Image: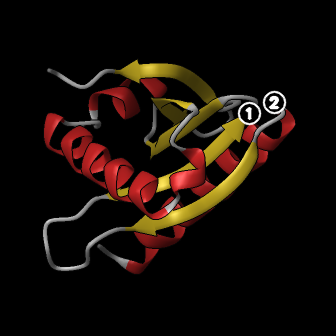
Amino acid sequence: MSPTNHRRGTQAEDRAAWWLRLKGYSILARRYRAGRGSGGGEIDIVARRGGVIAFVEVKARSDADLAALAITPAQTRRIARGAEIFLAEHPELNDLTYRFDAILMAPGRLPRHIADAWRLET
């Protein structure tokens, strides 16, 4: 990843965390990385509001629809693995409901928060 893309991604995550806080979420973790080198997962933001934990993927593109298309099945599997490890590390959260959200970012637009953006295949 180029330094410019990394900076753009970090700025998008900052804006997404701000947006979630405005919506009443507490940020539990940012840029969470689980199981380094072991195929563990990666989660941009872990947030909580009430009895719900949201594992959030942030995507920034020139258009929000392009950002949505950039969330791949491989990424959703990595995020799910990360969520599993995060919950194992925080057993006090195991009684809460969890879901996978997306926040789509595009220049000149407000963030688009999609709650329950995808579900795990069982």
- Tell me residue 97's x, y (percent): 54, 27
Colouring of the image: secondary structure
* Number of marks drawn: 2
Amino acid on which disc 2 is placed: Lys
The structure residue drawn at horizontal position 64% and vertical position 45%, both measured from the top left corner, is 47
- Tell me residue 117's x, y (percent): 42, 21
- Tell me residue 72's x, y (percent): 20, 36
Within 10 Å of disc 1 (Cα), the crowding (few <14, some 14-19, many 20+) is: some
Q: Nearer the viewer, residue 104 or 56?
A: 56
- Mark with earlier residue (2, 1): 2
Judge whether residue 13 can be spotted in this image: yes
- The quadrant in which the N terminus is found is bottom left
- Tell me residue 104's x, y (percent): 51, 33
Residue linked to disc 2: 23
Q: Which mark is residue 88?
A: none
- The quadrant in which the C terminus is found is top left
Q: Which mark is residue 49?
A: 1
Mark 2 and mark 1 residues within 8 Å of each other at the beta carbon? yes
Amino acid on which disc 1 is placed: Arg
